[in-house]
Amino acid sequence: MKNKKRILTIFLFLSIFMLLFSCRVPKAEWKGTIEEVNGVTVITNPKEPMYGEAFIRLEEDLCIGMETEYEDYMFADIRSIQVDNDEDIIVLDWKLNLIKVFDKNGKHKMTFGKHGEGPGEIQQPGRMYLKGDKDIGILDYSNSRFSYFSKEGECLKEIGLGKYSTLPRVIPDSRGFLYGDTLEREERFKRVLIKFNPDLTPVMTITDMERPLRRREFTPINKQLVYQVMADDRFIWANNFEYTFHIVDPSGKLIRKIIKDYDPVKITEEEKERITGDLLGDEVLPPGYEVVFPQHYPPIYYFRCDEKGKIYVRTYARNEQGLIKWDVFNEEGHYILSFFHPEEDLIFVIKKDRAYSFGEDNEEGIPVVKRYRMIGK
């Protein structure tokens, strides 16, 4: 009899607990639309996220770079970071031409890189990516080549850029195909986004985007093509002035569009002066030149994808504290929530519910790499 009463008491307790818990979970209702247009799934999102006031909280749990007495833990100028499936953190220091590898606890494992023009050497590394979560790809502007290295520092392969030396980035997928946008100045001035074979011969044009070429104008904010390779080798791209993502399967077929409504963010006169000053520094524009801004910021600054297919978009919108707004889309392309983060701390990788960033940590301008736990997802 006592056992029956005990079981009944436990059952009632659990029932009350589950009822209270379910009441605390926000009821979500996505208010967008989905339609099929010529074989393409088009997801249109409203301005407000599915979960309303819900947001992600970033809790710092690792910082690399503050141990200034140890050279292996110091950086001169971080240009890129990547994280593999072992959670090793790979950091590109473009000023020192070095790649540093740390384990998930922040312990230094390896430093490699040698300045120069010879085989396996690096002269001006601008971008770094992972091919299939394994090989490290380095875009070397001065040597005009894309090089693959192992995590142990062995140079595996070098690909000359040739006539594609204007590529601002080259992103490999797991099979070695490369994606990049190049500048063409034939009849019109435009950027062309191309899929390349592993030897950098073109396979197909994904899209192109005209950019007006106006003489005697300095334009600090321009139209750009922003893009990423997703974990399953789908390719995703957008024009930064249009809040529309295009997802292409590995064969090059457009399979999905993700569209979001938004409120344009006006560029104030004070911001125009600050941006111009940051870009020009002590330089002065030649006589007859003028600085030209659009009326509003583009809706997309840049974006990142995690291994599950979620999309994280850094915008130009800010909250009252001056933090930058990030929009988050789930695997289905639904706008689910947003969070805010300091502008100077660049989130570069999101993986396994962790966000990895780089920036300067204090007034001395010490470059650091940080990792955050993403709480509330």
Image (tube, rainbow, N blue to C red):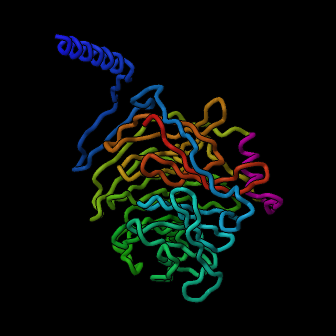
* Coordinates of residue 22 in the picture (x, y in percent): 33, 20
| Residue 292 x, y percent position in the rendering | 68, 51
Q: Is residue 31 above or below residue 160?
A: above
Image quadrant holding the C terminus, namely: top left
Residue 277 painted magenta: yes
**Farthest residue in the bottom direction?**
118
Whether residue 294 is situated above or below residue 377 in the rendered picture: below
Q: Identify the residue shown where x is 49% and y is 57%.
A: 225
Which of these two is toward me, 298 or 96? 96
Q: Position of residue 254 (x, y in %)?
A: 30, 56
Residue sitting nearer the eye, 251 or 111: 111
**What residue is drawn where x is 63% and y is 48%?**
345
Q: Which residues are magenta?
A: 270-288
Indicate whether 252 appears above or below 36: below
Quadrant in which residue 142 is drawn: bottom right
> Is 276 inside the magenta-drawn segment?
yes
Where is residue 191 drawn, in percent x and y? Answer: 49, 64
The vertical placement of 94 against 38, above or below, is: below
Residue 132 placement, left or right of 163: left
| Residue for point 82% across, 60% down | 284
